[in-house]
Image (cartoon, rainbow, N blue to C red):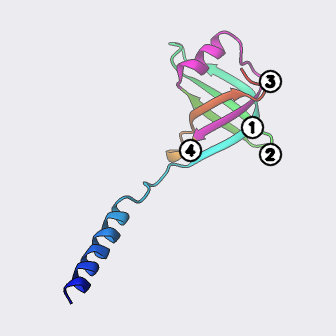
Amino acid sequence: MRTFVSKLMLSLAVAVSAASFSAPVAADDVKMVGVITKIKMASDGKSAVATLKDNKSGDSVTININDDLTLDKFKDKRIVEGDEIRAKYDNAGGKNESKSFKKTAGC
């Protein structure tokens, strides 16, 4: 009887600890490939808004860009309107914040 109670308590402890380590709710990450139709840099140069035309659906998607690497590529003209881009962005809250923004050819 004593071993039964011990095994039951151990099983309960394992179940509770497994439930507490469940994965957090992930934001809605969206991946897409599309052509840049418009790039608008902020006046301070610390952010930009890019509009892409999705290759699959044909819809226009506006993405906010805040990372320095991508902003430098815009400033240096390594990424310009008409380039095909592979983008990953977080659309939680409808803000479309960029996580990754790269040319399909590499850059």
Residue in view at x 71 percent, y 18 percent: 79
User: Badge 2: how crowded within 10 Å, few (<14), some, or many (20+)?
Assistant: few
As measured in the structure, the alpha-carbon distance from the residue carrying label 4 to the one carrying label 2 is: 18 Å
Position above or below: 26 against 100: below
Judge whether residue 83 is colored magenta.
Answer: yes
What amino acid is labelled 1 in the image? Val
As measured in the structure, the alpha-carbon distance from the residue carrying label 4 to the one carrying label 1 is: 15 Å
- Element marked by disc 4: loop
User: Which label is found at residue 33?
Assistant: 1
Residue in view at x 73 percent, y 30 percent: 85
Residue in view at x 50 percent, y 46 percent: 93
- Element marked by disc 3: loop
Residue, disc 2:
56
What amino acid is labelled 4 in the image? Asn
Position above or below: 80 against 8: above
Q: Position of residue 15 (x, y in %)?
A: 34, 71
Q: Which of marks 2 and 3 is nearer the N terminus?
A: 2
What amino acid is labelled 3 in the image? Gly
Q: Which of marks 3 and 4 is nearer the N terminus?
A: 3
